[in-house]
Structure formats: C-alpha cells, structure tokens
Amino acid sequence: MKTLFLTMLFFLITSIAVADYTIRSAYKFENIDMIKNSDGSNIMNTTATGVNSYSNGDTVIIKCLVNLKNSILTGSCQGSDKDGDIEYTTVERDVSKGNKGIMRRVGGTGKYENKSSTCEYVVELTDFSVGVGYLTASCKE
C-alpha cells in the first residue's frame, strides 16, 4: 500500500513539474531604433520576425513589436501556423536580471481560441550587431 501511494505521489509531482509543451524560437531583428530617455537610459523599439517550433510538431511564423525601456522588455506578438490559425502572445523580461522572461499566450483563432498559457523563456543567444536571436521556452496551459 505504501509503495502504491509513493508511486502515485511520484507521478503527480512529475506531472506538475513537467511542461505541457516546449518552444524553440529563432528570430531576426528589423527596424531597430533607439533614443535616450530624460534620465539617460535607452529606449529601444524593434520588430522581431521568426519561427517558433513547438514540441507537438506545430510551427508558427511570428512577428513581434518589442519595446525596451529602463531595462524592461515588453512586446506583443502575432503568429500563424500552417492551418492559418492565429496565436497572440505577449513577452516580458527585466534584462537587468538576466536572460529569463515570461511569454503568455493571450488568445487567438482556431486551435488557439480561448486558449491561454504561460511560458518561462530563456534567451540562449542574441546578437544585435548581426540582428538575430534564439530562445527556448517551457510552457504550461
């Protein structure tokens, strides 16, 4: 009985800890523009376009409008998959605290309609001089 209880507890804990799905995302920066704020900090706006590869096999072509002000990165994204379904997401990260941020699915059409999720993402590589980036994410619906 004790073994059965421990086995069930183990599966419950691992199912909670494991992500529902993962994302690999490669993107390029376009139209990078930057100005100085009154306090001397930088304000940057850019468009990021790329592709998200989901662990379930789906691929989504994305376009994000991203703003960086006082070390806080925020953005809104729209993506479409091979079925023409559209996914809307937001991103946020305090770049002064490292390469981890939050991505949220906030809705969409088709399979993404009335679906939300929260992902913790890690920027694996970014090079603004080349204009490219790569991130991975672990998501829960």
Image (cartoon, rainbow, N blue to C red):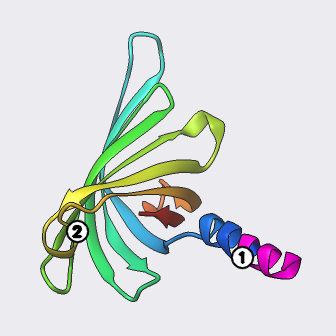
Earlier in the chain: of badge 2 and badge 1, it is 1
Amino acid, disc 1: Met
Nearer to the camera, 19 or 5: 5
Number of on-image labels: 2
x, y percent for residue 54: 42, 79
Q: Residue at x 58, y 58 (%)?
A: 122
Q: Evaluate if marks 2 and 1 touch, with contact meaning CB atoms under 8 Å apart.
A: no
Looking at the rendered structure, the secondary structure element under dot 2 is: helix
Relative to 78, 98 lies left or right: right
Q: Quadrant of residue 112?
A: bottom left
Q: Position of residue 43 (x, y in %)?
A: 38, 29
C-alpha separation, residue under disc 2 versus residue under disc 1: 32 Å
Position of residue 137 in the picture relative to residue 141 (left or right): right
Tell me where the magenta segment starts and ends, as one range: 1-9
Res 120 seen here: yes
Asked if one can make out residue 32 in the rendered structure from this viewpoint, the answer is: no
Residue sitting at the far right: 2
Residue located 86% across and 81% down the image: 3
Q: Which residue is mark 1?
A: 8
Name the amino acid type tagged 2: Tyr
Residue at numbered disc 2: 112
Up the image or down, 124 lies above or below 102; here it is: below
> Around disc 2, counting alpha carbons within 10 Å, would you say few (fewer than 14), some (14 to 19), or many (20 or more)?
some
For residue 42, what is the image quadrant? top left
Within the magenta stretch, is there residue 108?
no
Q: Main secondary structure of the magenta part?
A: helix
